[in-house]
Every structure is written in C-alpha cells, then in structure tokens.
C-alpha cells in the first residue's frame, strides 16, 4: 500500500524515470477497460443486455479501483514529497477568478479535446451519457457510488473533468485557455499542485489528439429507445 507512504511503488523515487506529460502511467488494464466498455455500450444500444453485462464483468474493476485509490489519485502528492519543491502560497480569495466551477464551460472543453485526457491520453465518456447509461442498465455491479471504493473503475478512468492547468487558488482563470480535459485519475493526481511542482509539461502546449471519438454523446438519445 502507498497511501501514507513517502514513496509510491508505481512511481519510484527517481524523478528522471517519471513520465513527463502526466503524473503517473496508467496501467494497461485501464485502456483495456475502455475497450470493454465501448463494446458493452454498443451491445446495449442494440438491445443485447446479456452481452452488455458480459463485457462489463470483463473489466478488472477491483484491481483498477485499488490502483486508483493507492496510486492514481495520490501520484501528485508522492511526486511533491520526492521533489521537495516549495509550495506556492494561495493568493487571497478576493484576487482569484470569481468563477471557480468550470461547469458552464466543461462540455466545450470536452468537445475541443475529443473527450480524451490531455495528460494520459485515455478516452473518456460524456458525463450525461454515463449517468443515463447506468440508470438504464440498472446493474448493481456498475454504479457511480458515493465513495471511491463503491465507484466502478469506469468512473475512475473514463469520467471527464475540466481541469485547471494553473490551479484556481493560485490565480488560474476558469476559461478555455486554462482548462483541459482530464480523466478523474489525472485530475485527482494533479490535485492543486502546479506543473512545476509536479515536474510535468504543460498539456496546452500539446495539440489535442485527433480522433473521431466523441464520448458517446451521439448515443445519448439511443438510450431512450
């Protein structure tokens, strides 16, 4: 277990071996889970619930959820412990952008970035689609849950978040020029740290991955039928 420890077994203690564009490398099972989920969705909209459940059950849910809790969401903290860079003080609240939540801009951000995490490159799914899919599927082994341990791994790895590149409490604006699409793993891993503190490159300096992937936005209406 890495929670509460000074070194993450997934990262190691040598910064020169760390990935430069994200806090931590996602396990291959996470990308395999994405493909299984895509198959599950396609079967569901075709009316085959049995095959949908089969592909949902093929996902390494417990293993990926454990990885997220122990390594993924803690990766920024573990980087900071090793680098020992001084934490920038938060700026007075009266000097911060009065708009903190990116909720009104997030769909624009997701569409611009082709529903793909700008840090790790994993494909993500529309929040609206995922919530509706879970409700329609009504399968007790595939839930959003209230705690990390209750949430299915697909939520940990495919739920999109509009991430502030420059943290809001350090003066970052809630605008398209400071927001990127991130998976929950990268968003929690980055936490409120700066890119300099984490020693990762600016995702805005890399073009979004070109793709036809649209996060199943085009299948939301199909769930009604």
Image (cartoon, rainbow, N blue to C red):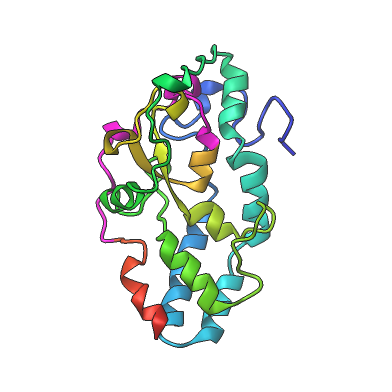
The answer to which of 137 and 25 lies nearer the viewer is 137
Q: Is residue 163 magenta?
A: no
Residue at (56, 30) in percent of width and height: 76
Q: Is residue 57 above or below residue 30?
A: below
Residue 158 at what x, y percent from top left?
A: 47, 56
Image quadrant where residue 139 sits: bottom right
Residue 26 at what x, y percent from top left?
A: 52, 45
Q: Residue furthest front?
A: 94
Residue at (61, 19) in percent of width and height: 82
Magenta span main SS: loop
The answer to which of 211 and 132 lies nearer the viewer is 132
* Magenta residues, start to end: 189-212
Q: Is residue 111 visible?
A: yes
Q: Residue furthest top?
A: 86
Q: Which quadrant of the figure contains the N terminus?
A: top right
Residue at (31, 70) in percent of width and height: 218
């Amino acid at each position: 277990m890495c929670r509460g420890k000074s070194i993450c077994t997934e990262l190691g203690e040598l910064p020169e071996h760390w990935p430069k564009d994200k806090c931590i490398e996602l396990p291959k099972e996470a990308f395999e889970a994405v493909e299984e989920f895509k198959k599950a969705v396609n079967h569901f909209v075709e009316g085959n619930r049995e095959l949908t459940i089969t592909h949902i059950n093929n996902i390494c849910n417990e293993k990926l959820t454990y990885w997220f809790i122990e390594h993924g969401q803690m990766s920024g903290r573990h980087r900071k412990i090793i680098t020992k860079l001084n934490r920038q003080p938060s700026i007075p609240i009266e000097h911060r952008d009065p708009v903190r939540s990116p909720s009104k801009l997030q769909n624009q951000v997701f569409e611009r970035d082709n529903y793909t995490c700008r840090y790790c490159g994993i494909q993500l799914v529309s929040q609206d689609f995922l919530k509706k899919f879970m409700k329609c599927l009504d399968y007790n082994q595939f839930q959003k849950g209230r705690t990390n341990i209750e949430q299915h791994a697909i939520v940990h790895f495919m739920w999109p978040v509009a991430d502030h590149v420059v943290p809001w409490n350090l003066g970052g604006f809630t605008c398209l020029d400071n927001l990127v699409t991130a998976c929950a793993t990268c968003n929690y891993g980055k936490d409120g740290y700066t890119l300099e503190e984490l020693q990762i490159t600016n995702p805005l300096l890399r073009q979004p991955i070109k793709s036809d992937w649209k996060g199943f936005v085009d299948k939301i209406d199909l769930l009604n039928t």
